[in-house]
Image (cartoon, rainbow, N blue to C red):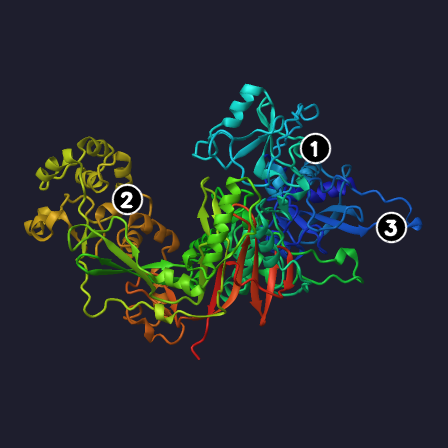
Amino acid sequence: MATDLGEMLVPYMPTVRVPKTGDRVFKSECSFSFDSPESEGGLYVCMNTFLGFGREHVERHYRKTGQSVYMHLKRHVKEKATGAAGGAIPRRRNGKVFLDLELNRDFNGEDYEYEDEAKLVIFPDHFEIPLPNIEELPALVTIACDAVLNAPSAYKKQEPESWEEEIQVSRHARSLRQLDNGVRIPPSGWKCQKCEMRENLWLNLTDGAMLCGKWFFDGSGGNGHALDHYKETKHPLAVKLDTITPDGADVYSFEEEEAVLDPHISEHLSHFGIDMLQMQKKTENGHHTDNNARPRVSEWEVIQESGMKLKAVYGSGYTGIKNLGNSCYLSTVLQVLFSIPDFQRMYVGNLQRIFDYSPLDPTQDFATQMAKVGHGLLSGQYSKPPMKSELIEQHQQKGISPRMLKALVARGHPEISSNRQQDAQEFFLHMINLVERNSTSSENPSDAFRFLVEERVQCCQTRQVRYTQRVDYCIQLPAPIEAATNREELLAYESKRREAEENMRPPPEPVRARIPFTACLQAFTEPENVPDFWSSALQAKSAGVKTSRFASFPEYLVLQIKKFTFGVDWVPKKLDLGIDVPDFLDLSRLRATGLQSGEEELPDLMPPIVLPEDMRDSSMSSLDSPEIDEAAVMQLAEMGFPLEACRKAVYYTGNMGPEMAFNWIIAHMEEPDFSEPLMLPSMLDPGLSSSADSPMGATPLDNSPPEESIAILTSMGFPRTHTIQALKATNNNLERALDWIFTHPEEEESDALSNMADTEPNDNAFSNANSHSDSTLSPDRDTSGPRVKDGPGRYELFAIISHMGASTMSGHYVCHIKKEGRWVIYNDHKVCLSERPPKDLGYIYFYHRLSSS
């Protein structure tokens, strides 16, 4: 039999690999679905690529790659026998098979046992070889199987436990001497005993001294008085005051120079009157909460509807998302996106096409992973009600775990790739950016959010105006505290709070600001000052004001309430406020009108280039002969490039060195005038001199962007035509142009023509936009501009993302979505019917456009 197996495997031996250092083994989850070894069909791991596939997807991989050898992994979950008749608990079979394989279920380890099964499967005949089978398998195959079975799961390193440093118990904890000096620490109003610092305070556990911590490179921290105190007294241990929870606290040992554990911290704190059990819990259900006061407790209860008996719902569109460790910001955004038909059609409607045309490594393909998550949320396959009559093996897991998508969208992003909490609004825009980059065809679901903002800038002295347009996806509404309807109550609370802080007494009962939604809209539409405004009419800096209006209305409107500000430590902190956000919204009066009769436009002039004093004389004398770094020119010419081309490259890159000029040459060497002499406007026609038509050196704004700006962008590798489009669309702003390029991938000419054919031409799409009665796809005035789905400005609220906590860097997110006429709360993996959606405490609000009928 051994000989037969060996001979049978000979044709497949070249395709069987042993995992090397750096190879990721996907043995816990399918690349196309959320099937795992615990699923009914188990998981197939390719013995060449080490990618995992569920039963319905492994055939696709075999057909596409020709890889025939797979390891089939199956975990059987069984309920332990109980009672006298149960006897001894059975031992786990094949104990080493799934080493380091995390469980996808929430089974209690004391009530269930696991039986693991592994075997090699040869396609296409599905010939099975049970494992282990050392005697009968070739040595290479045996080594490869052992390596796969013992390899850590590909995403295990993302779990929070993997990056947290192990902290040791301090050698001073057991024998710490505490002075009986009568010191008692109040619950609030803390301040350093040697300075005015109220942040980063440390309590010395020997004498109760309350002192500030070290100064950090970013300007935060303190004045180092806690360390100075140790040097004077040699009292070794201190606890950070704002980290005390029922579970422990952050303790530092000055003598050991590291963070330490204090097993007796509760006793040590009680010596100074601090009861740990009364402190707010720090972590709960995988997300951070605060140690702040009562308003936060109330906020958590209201938003999560924790005091109510909520009814769980199951099925298509009611699938939860497991918290991967402070990943609730991701979960809420994904739940909202996949409740929108455009995203459903793009990723779930095209599921089979996306999967069939996915690259060889589908874990690194954005469309594939979005389709996988979309199908997981909408299929209902991972959201079935538990039934007592079912066997344990058929029990459905609670929610999906989008590890692959998170790893993919976090690649290259220092914050999202961490396990820290993030701002949901920033992640929403990050996702929109990724959708834009990966939607190369005319079908782009982010079109549903895109709209144009008209900005009107007016010179306060001449009253002349300029109109420009920009693309946006989210409106940020200010929250004017001064407009609060309970302003007197807020002032009284603030006075009591300061008094309590100065006298080191407990703070008063907090008061939440109540702000009318109309006040937020009013603050958004009010004129704002333009810093460093340069008036082209005066040819000088002047006072300017800017107002913003909707040049188009999106199909789905996103409103973010600006609840966050920065504290003294530069950490974003949330304002405690409630806003009466309406269910129905009519923004028609905020429709942009364009240039009005009687308004005079500012001249199309750019600010002059301001040169240092020592360069002005030389620059004036070199108008006919522009200053060019000849050394850089010769360095390029020595490489074999034409001399005139080298001169142009150095000039158009602003004498920024031969490397930048070389990039310009590579980007322009195919142009017909590449080797022609450098010709500037002043050389072509003396009448174009800036002193004649444009006083003070201002430059007319024609349709062609400055060649210097074009050169800088093309030197980065972007096509010249795409660069010119970007500069035109952003008023020649380099930073915004770079942003525009990334959010508007270059399309083939045929695609652009078909896109134009699909749109309804309208020369007055923005200046006379009120003529739109239906939802139409309207092109910009420039056919290369952004496409928007314009329509009426009337909306209905359908989703809310709410934040609980004092900062975007901590806390927890949940979302409420209106489906089938009823509100549903999505709180990580828990999905229930909502009784009271917290419409006044939301952070991001999503509206869908009402039809014109």
Q: Nearer the viewer, mark 2 or mark 1?
A: 1
Q: Which mark is residue 497?
A: none
Amino acid carrying mark 3 in the image: Ala
Q: Quadrant of residue 546?
A: bottom left
Q: Could you give the CA–CA distance between mark 2 and mark 1, rounded to whole angstroms?
A: 64 Å
Instruction: Give the camera-side residue of 71 and 736.
Output: 736
Q: Are marks 2 and 1 in contact (CB under 8 Å)?
A: no
Which residue is identified by label 1? 267
Which residue is identified by label 2? 712
- Can you name the residue that lies furthest to the bottom here? 853
Instruction: Give the camera-side residue of 717 and 446.
Output: 446
Q: Secondary structure at mark 1?
A: helix
- Can you name the residue that lies furthest to the right here? 84
Instruction: Give the camera-side residue of 272 and 723.
Output: 272
254 over 392 or under it: above or below: above
* Label 2 or label 1, whichever comes before in sequence order: 1
Which residue is identified by label 3? 81
Q: The C terminus is located in which quarter?
A: bottom left
Residue drawn at 28 percent across, 42 percent down: 666
Q: Position of residue 637 (x, y in %)?
A: 21, 34
515 over 796 or under it: above or below: above
Q: Are marks 3 and 1 in contact (CB under 8 Å)?
A: no
Q: Position of residue 405 (x, y in %)?
A: 55, 51
